[in-house]
Amino acid sequence: MRAIYEITRPKEYLSPLEEPLGNMIREWAEKEVIPRRRRFDEDWRDHRLIEPAFRKLMGEMGMQRAPFPEDLGGLGMGHSEHLGINSFLVMEEMARADSGMAVSYGVTFWPLFMICNEPHVNRRLCEEFAPMFCATTEARFAANAMTEPQGGADIENLDLLRGSTINTTAVQEGDEWVINGHKLWPTNTGGIAHLFGVVATTRLGSDDPRDFAFILVPADTPGVTQGDPYEKGGMAADKNGDVWFENVRVPVWYRACGPGDDFKYFKEIISIGSLGSIAMVSGCMLNVYETLQEFTSRRRIRGVPLKEHDAIGGVLADIVRDMEIIRITGYQYARMIDRPDLYGERWSEEMVAKGRVYKYFACDRAVEDLGRAMNIMEAHGADREWDVEKHWRDLKIIQLWMGGKQLCQMETARWFFSCETL
């Protein structure tokens, strides 16, 4: 039987950290997550099982320190020439165990990347917030407060709407920002966020990039309220809820990059978000591959293992075909992110569009393939004992976020076909 790590990835792209980092995350997953994940669905509100696994990975193992500079206690990922490759590796390994934990971990870095990544490091804010993540062994979470009730993913549709539909306002009064607004669905809300990256406008209705603001807001700031977590169809380890900002005051220098630059570098979050999504799809599929190997070898029809029947073998081949393409594509995109000298900056329209292409291709293929896998397993496909239905539910959520398939299609057509109104 072939091991999951024989599913192809371009070995010439791998970083020196590939083996030690991969082994560390895999060992954590096998010990702290996989034996317990079938009970995660009932733990969606309290995280009694989920929180200890997060604490082990993020606090005790120090993975929440990743983006900060080394001299501030971080791991220096923000200036690593292997940012994309290392991010893909970690997210893939985590998602093999539980993609809800992967997205919760990955999104913690979205606001931090705005201040920690080269070439737009905000040293003052790194020094301000590094102790929150680097001086503790408790898990610390950040949330990207972006989506709003009236517009859904409009905020992510930057090249067309340019922030003109943002209703959360940031008004400068002296040396402070005063923030008012309502956000919903941010990962790591529902009461667990310690730090918010808030997308706001400094002038309602403006499509001027200089009015698009990204401001860091500690969760314990007066006027910040987190609602209860939503009960979802999957990804129990990723808490989502409503967040209200009512006359929230933070120092004016808590703005991440400044007028015009917040808009530009926020696109980097979209690219990295697409990369992480592909990695999570790949990780889920790797675990399903393991399950199919076991099931189709153990299950016998007419005295022959299920996998030896022509009809089943053809479906298995189609599934592994898609796994190969998804994984190779994901690592290629990670390499493109790490080589701006060849492919352009992470925040360019081209890189955003290509990330959208790869993300929605991966999600479409994986959701279809999980349905095929469940068909092969018949009633066992819906049995929680096998975990396939868990990955099926989680993969559908990956397909839906970041504007879903529709925004991916719009941005793809916009760049490749120069569409002006999509």
Image: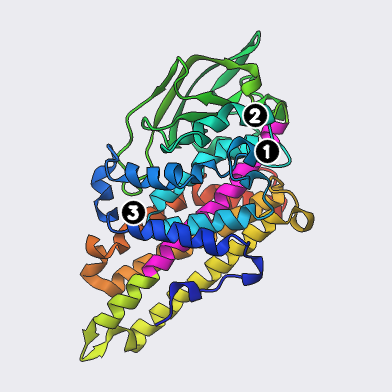
In primary-sequence order, the first of circles 2 and 1 is 2
Task: Tell me if label 2 and label 1 are in contact, CB under 8 Å.
Answer: yes
Q: Which of the labelled discs sits on residue 274, or is there none?
A: none
Q: Which residue is mark 2?
A: 256
For label 2, the SS is loop
Q: Which residue is mark 1?
A: 265
Range shown magenta: 261-288
Amino acid at dot 2: Ala
Q: Nearer the viewer, residue 243 or 208?
A: 243
Amino acid at dot 3: Glu
- Residue 337 lies in quadrant: bottom right
Amino acid at dot 1: Tyr
For label 3, the SS is helix
**At which x and y percent is residue 178?**
56, 14
Give the prevailing secondary structure in the magenta stretch. Answer: helix
In primary-sequence order, the first of circles 3 and 1 is 3
- Residue 329 lies in quadrant: bottom right
